Image (cartoon, helix red, strand yellow):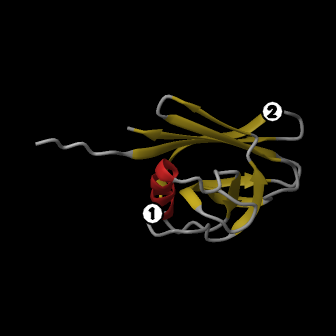
Amino acid sequence: MLNDQLKVTGDVVVEITGPDGQIKDRREIKNLVVATGKTFIASRIVGTPTAMSHMAIGSNSTAAATNDAALGAELGRVALSSSTSSGAVVTYVASFPAGTGTGAVVEAGVFNASSSGTMLCRTVFAVVNKGADDAMSITWAITVS
């Protein structure tokens, strides 16, 4: 009897850079691939739904749950700077410039639209304070194993 269990996991790196170009904060976080994300992955095998294209940050610290379909309180959303695939790893990178997503950031997600859309994954983390003059970059690696 074969027992093959497919897993999808994610690793997120969040960095805040001050106006002087110095890194003020750096976090490495695990994420949850939500139910809509797993459905999206399965649909890509036989169809062509809109690819993941945006990342959002928010201020709601409610724990990530399988049935999440959006962030709890979105502060800002940007188009991905890059999306690459190598072997079983897809990496998404987004940059939130000064003035975008300002506040106490505690959640992030990957989406396939500039508003609403399908959420692939969500993570919640200890507060990262993004000042009005700060930039934030997020690198999100999704591994299928």
- For the residue marked with disc 2, what is the amino acid? Gln
Circle 2 residue: 22
For mark 1, what is the residue? 35
Q: Where is residue 96 in the image (x, y as percent from the top left)?
A: 79, 49
Residue 60's label in the rendered image is none
**Looking at the figure, which quarter contains the C terminus?**
top left
Please, what secondary structure does the residue beneath circle 1 have? helix
Instruction: Give the mark, 1 or 2, whose residue is nearer the N terminus.
Output: 2
Name which residue lies at 57% across and 66% down. 61
How busy is the neighbourhood of tag 1: few (under 14 within 10 Å), some, or many (20 plus)? some
Residue 70 found in image quarter: bottom right
Viewer-closest of 80 and 65: 80
Q: Where is residue 80 in the image (x, y as percent from the top left)?
A: 73, 46
Pinpoint residue 52: horizontal percent, then vertical percent: 64, 51
Q: Quadrant of the N terminus?
A: top left
Which residue occupies 60% across, 63% down?
A: 118
**Which three-letter amino acid code belongs to the residue tagged 1?**
Ala
The residue positioned 87% from the left and 55% from the top of the image is 132
